Image (tube, rainbow, N blue to C red):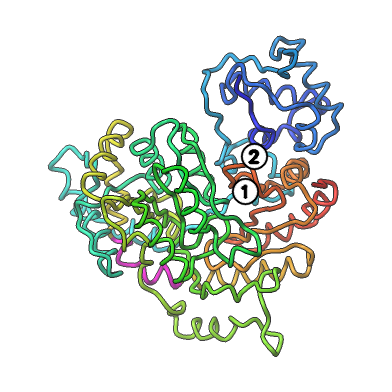
Amino acid sequence: MARIASTRLSRLLTGWSSEGPGPLPRRLADALRELAARGDVAGGTVLPSQRELALVLGVSRSTVTAAYGLLESGGWLESVRGSGSRLRGSGTADGYVTEGRLVSFDARSRTAVSAGGADLSSGALPGLGAVGEAVAALTGGDVGALLGDDGYHPYGIPALREGIAAYYRAAGVPTEADQILVTSGSQQAVWLVAQALVEPGDTVVVENPTYRGALEALRARGARLVPVGGDGPADGGQSADAAALRRLCAHVRPRLVYLQPTAHNPTGRSMDGAARREWQRVLGERELFVVEDTACAELSLGDAADGRDGADGRGGRGGADGRDVTDARDARDARDGTGGVDEAAPVPLVAELPMGASVTVGTLSKLFWGGLRVGWVRSSPQVVARLAKIKTSVDLSCSVVDQLVAVRLLDRLPEARARRRAELRGRRDAAEALLRAGAPHWEWTRPAGGPALWVRVPGADTEALAQLARRHGVSVVPGSAFSPVDGFRDRLRLPYGHGTDALAAALPTLLECAERAVG
């Protein structure tokens, strides 16, 4: 019988404790029944024990016991001696349980945080004005030039494919247009890779933690996820360990390796030069197929990934005069408008590896606006053709209008990088200052990129913390959502991309819930 982990079930149970009439057990029973009715949890799935679920939800065991009793009396739950409680469902049976990654965009979640609460569940950034300007600059001639055909471009319109290829060439990475497939954002790109290159049961190596959208896509495909690396002080500031991959390959050959070397999601870390070279050596020696996700790479903040920042474990190190060591550089960047060093496109780690054994995933959605659903895959023409065949069966092609906007925005990448870099540095510093003052015992390493802090809450079970916080109108994502093995239950991802107002409003609630959610 299939079992669902308590951590995964808790991430599906959103809003239940703050919505609906009746006592808490009734609301929990209703939420579990809704999951079964929709098929979000397949019929026949064995639920966690009452004690285990109570701990992760931050409620008493009697609440779960009563909820299970209500489900059983209503015919939705069956107790199997020696096996636990099995949920009966009327929805579509599916071997994979989705985790509701985009719950922050769910109407239920919005309702839960609307009354004086705070939504910290998404790291997506507000859009740049350049998007509106690019839309306004489109002319009838831009569209008219394409109206002579049927509008279906499975690989992407030629101008955008060439523009993306030129983007890589400008970074010193030889690329032709036939090596590019335009996708509906980077999430579709990762999903296509999983569908095309992974068979059920295949071993896929991932960092731990890693992007939860990739975990969902790979789990849905039936991959066997094997984590490498970690997030402790001994990892040298890197998000994964190439030596661990070498040791693993002595026993099993992975189908592919999924990596985020630059502006890693969720930690915000970037591999330094030595780590990148070691990964390239191991991947090349073992002739492994690698998928490099650079979705957040354009959100790199230009900090040296040398382990100096965050040396005290609490998000940064002051200079001799008490100022942060980045203050002088940031002031210079503000004056000259460059946003700091390295304003060129980020160079993929896989640029040094054979094209036929690698995929690079990229996007404009992270940098410019999530509403602009334009991403891509860079690989060999053969892999691109294989992915395009699957994409065509799903949506025929991406929106031509979005692609025309993207062509214009490619010319504004340096400007957009500089603006985002300046914004995110300032907001990161403000978020760190807020936590130093309000939660001095919390720990984090200063991120080199991205829109969030990856924070350790000592002594707390953040799964329970997140459930307790939702009851007070605060939505936050626990660390286990980013782990292939439900690890990091002492971590939270705290976004700062929209500023610190939401974090400041949520912090007293998070601190209170952390005291109650003892790990």
Quadrant where the image shows the N terminus: top right
Q: Is residue 75 left or right of residue 127?
A: right
Q: Amino acid at mark 1?
A: Ser
Amino acid of disc 2: Ser
Tell me, yes or no, whether the highlighted magenta stretch contains residue 173. Answer: no
The residue singled out by tag 1 in the image is 121
Q: Can you say whether 445 is above or below 138 in the image?
A: below
C-beta proximity under 8 Å, tags 1 and 2: yes
User: Is residue 239 depicted above or below 476 in this figure?
Assistant: below
Q: Is 292 displayed left or right of 106 in the figure? A: left
Query: In this rendering, does residue 349 appear at all?
Result: yes
Q: Is residue 438 visible?
A: no
Q: Which residues are magenta?
A: 408-418
Can you tell which mark lies on residue 109? 2
Helix, strand or loop for disc 1:
loop
Taking the image as shown, residue 426 lies to the left or right of residue 351, namely right
State the residue in front, 277 or 272. 277
Q: Residue furthest bottom?
A: 321
Q: 350 above or below 332?
A: above
Residue 10: assigned label: none
**Magenta-colored stretch includes residue 409:** yes
Q: CA distance from mark 1 to mark 2?
A: 10 Å
Q: Who comes first in sequence, dot 1 or dot 2?
A: 2
* Residue 282: image location, x then y, percent: 41, 58
Is the residue marked by circle 2 packed among few (<14), some (14-19), or many (20+) residues within 10 Å? many
Question: Residue 414's spot in the image, x, y percent?
Answer: 37, 71
